[in-house]
Image (cartoon, helix red, strand yellow):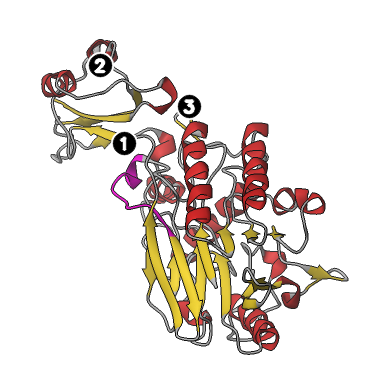
Amino acid sequence: MRILHTSDWHLGQELYGHDRGPEHDVFLQWLLETIDAREVDALIITGDIYDVVNPPIEAQQRFYRFLNSALSQSDHMQIVVIGGNHDSGSRVELPKALLPHNRVYLVGGMPRAVGVVDPAGAILELKDKYGVTGAVCAAIPYLRPGDLPAGQSGSNPVAQLYAASIQAANQRASGVPVIATGHLHIAGGAVSELSERRIFVGGEEAVSADIFPSDVAYVALGHLHNPQLIPGSTLIRYAGSPFPLSSTERGYEHSVVLLDLSGGGSVPTLIRTPRPVPFLRVPNDGFASLAEIESLLAALPLPEVPSNLRPFLEIAITMDSPIPDLRQRIDAALQGKPVRLTRLLRQSNAVASDGQPGSATKELSEFDPLQVFVRRYMKEYGVEPPEPLKKAFLQLVAALAESGPDQTASGAA
């Protein structure tokens, strides 16, 4: 049984007003070719299909075209899609009635039976090209508060739900490997600055890897954009995003996971994904003066490419004092260059009144909400807010992010 695991596409994302659609087209075409060349039996996509709960029409069309092409080029491959924290569960499941029920499984939210969460309803049998069941999948999507059981004293409701789902999967497995999915933050996972939204599952920001027992062959995770292996009693992996969703991800080696399941166990292989658009920074690290920036930009090698695939550029400048014509000089230095400017970071060299050196200035959107809350609280009361208050604030932010009708941001998670 051969499975391909990918995640966090964020279709419809814009980066500082720049459309990422052409990059998604390159990735999705590459994915179709990879599925065909590697003779994949099942594709698992672990959430955040879209960047916002109300994605643009073009993003939905892009997803549907991919599903149609993937089903057309293979007469047996199955597709499992779970909802993420950026997705509307009902929107993920919207085309379900139009797709072959034995080949495409859209699990936007936890299945219910008579209005009650039904862990057994998320159990799927994955078949090989001969129609033989090669794996059983507990397709658990991003869990919202209403999906979780009432916690027993001292027990974690997320662990309870996964235990019930994995037990149901084992009952169906009859000796074949069991796979579990999830869209959550597992403790120990490396997060991405600027590009991941804090989420709370079961009242906790990070869940222990102990919820996945050793009798699960593979755990396919979504949410964290950095492809990574999570230490645990079994094989636990974040597939990561297909390409950088913010400048902080430019150093990642983005990939998908090709998983071979057999009697000998699970063998994962990472396949690097294409990077259609380079992410550039001037200077490459740190900050530089305006004169140095102008010199570096003049020497920047930039081959001509289609306008919608031009490199993204971030500039980090240090200043002794304000430069009134800063933007005009930057624009002049970029005149005629095939590049798209995203951020202009500024660092002041001036010494503050408390004797401390200046620091880099940021736009409000670049701050973590918790940082803004802590600064405001300290200004008002002179001390840091207590931990329970921080946690309550973050839960409120997470709830607003999930329910807001227009979640627009330059970063994604």
Disc 3 to disc 2, how far (Cα)?
19 Å
Of callouts 2 and 1, which one flags the residue occurring earlier in the amino acid sequence?
1
Task: Tell me the residue at 51%/42% (across/down).
Answer: 29
Please name whichever residue, 298 or 105, is drawn nearer the observer in this view of the structure: 105
Q: Is residue 182 visible?
A: yes
**Is 252 contained in the magenta span?**
yes
Q: Is residue 413 visible?
A: no
Instruction: Answer few, some or many: residues within 10 Å of disc 3's Cα (few below 14, many 20 plus, some between 14 and 19).
Output: few
Instruction: Answer few, some or many: residues within 10 Å of disc 2's Cα (few below 14, many 20 plus, some between 14 and 19).
Output: some
Indicate the amino acid at tag 3: Gly
In the rendered image, the residue lying farthest to the right is 114
Disc 3 to disc 1, how far (Cα)?
15 Å
**Left or right: where does residue 253 sit relative to residue 241?**
left
Residue topped by disc 3:
17
Q: Which mark is residue 146?
A: none
Disc 2 to disc 1, how far (Cα)?
18 Å
Figure check: 123 above or below 71 = below
Viewer-side label of 3, 1: 1
Q: Position of residue 364 (x, y in %)?
A: 42, 35
Q: Which mark is residue 279?
A: 1
Indicate the amino acid at tag 2: Ile
Please name whichever residue, 349 or 237, is drawn nearer the observer in this view of the structure: 237
**Is 172 contained in the magenta span?**
no
Q: What is the secondary structure assignment of the residue under circle 3?
A: loop
Residue topped by disc 2:
330
Q: What is the secondary structure assignment of the residue under circle 1?
A: strand
The range drawn in magenta is 247-256
Q: Are marks 2 and 1 in contact (CB under 8 Å)?
A: no
